[in-house]
Image (tube, grey):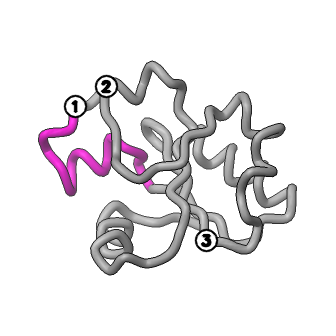
């Protein structure tokens, strides 16, 4: 399942309850970042996913979407059933929602 940048903005604007899970590497947060994310790098997600609620809606983001898609599959295998991927990742967010965000 995918969530578009516009849909994510609407969720945030409406203060909907969900987890915005950023699976990028720590050095990437300094390039472009969104407030309110839960940060678990993809390579740590297998062991750190226990810190997430499997019943909560989770939107996974990365730079462009491919790592987030892999992360969503991993979470679904672990029993998370309401997981989507930010289509186009943080770069798409920058293009559509916040043009001040650096593209990388």
Give the distance between the C-alpha atoms of the residues marked 1 and 2, in whole angstroms: 7 Å
> Which numbered marker is on residue 66?
none
The residue carrying mark 3 is: 57
Q: Quadrant of residue 23?
A: top right
- Residue 98 placement (x, y as % from top left): 18, 50
- Residue 93 placement (x, y as % from top left): 30, 51
Q: Quadrant of residue 100?
A: top left
Q: Residue at (34%, 46%) from the top-left corner?
A: 34
> Which numbered marker is on residue 31?
2
Start-end of magenta stretch? 87-102
Q: Secondary structure at mark 1?
A: loop
Give the distance between the C-alpha atoms of the residues marked 3 and 2, in whole angstroms: 26 Å
The residue carrying mark 1 is: 102
Q: Residue at (20%, 56%) from the top-left corner?
A: 97
- Residue 36 placement (x, y as % from top left): 41, 53
- In the picture, the quarter occupied by the C terminus is top left
- In the picture, the quarter occupied by the N terminus is bottom right
Please state if 96 lies on the left or on the right of 12 as rendered.
Answer: left
């Amino acid at each position: 399942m995918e969530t578009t940048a516009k849909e994510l903005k609407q969720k945030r604007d409406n203060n909907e309850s969900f987890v915005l899970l950023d699976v990028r590497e720590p050095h990437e947060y300094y390039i472009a970042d969104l407030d309110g994310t839960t940060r678990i790098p993809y390579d740590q997600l297998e062991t750190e996913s226990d810190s997430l609620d499997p019943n909560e809606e989770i939107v996974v983001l990365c730079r462009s979407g491919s790592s987030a898609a892999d992360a969503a599959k991993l979470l679904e295998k672990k029993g998370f059933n309401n997981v989507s991927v930010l289509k186009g990742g943080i770069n798409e967010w920058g293009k559509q929602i916040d043009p001040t965000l650096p593209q990388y």
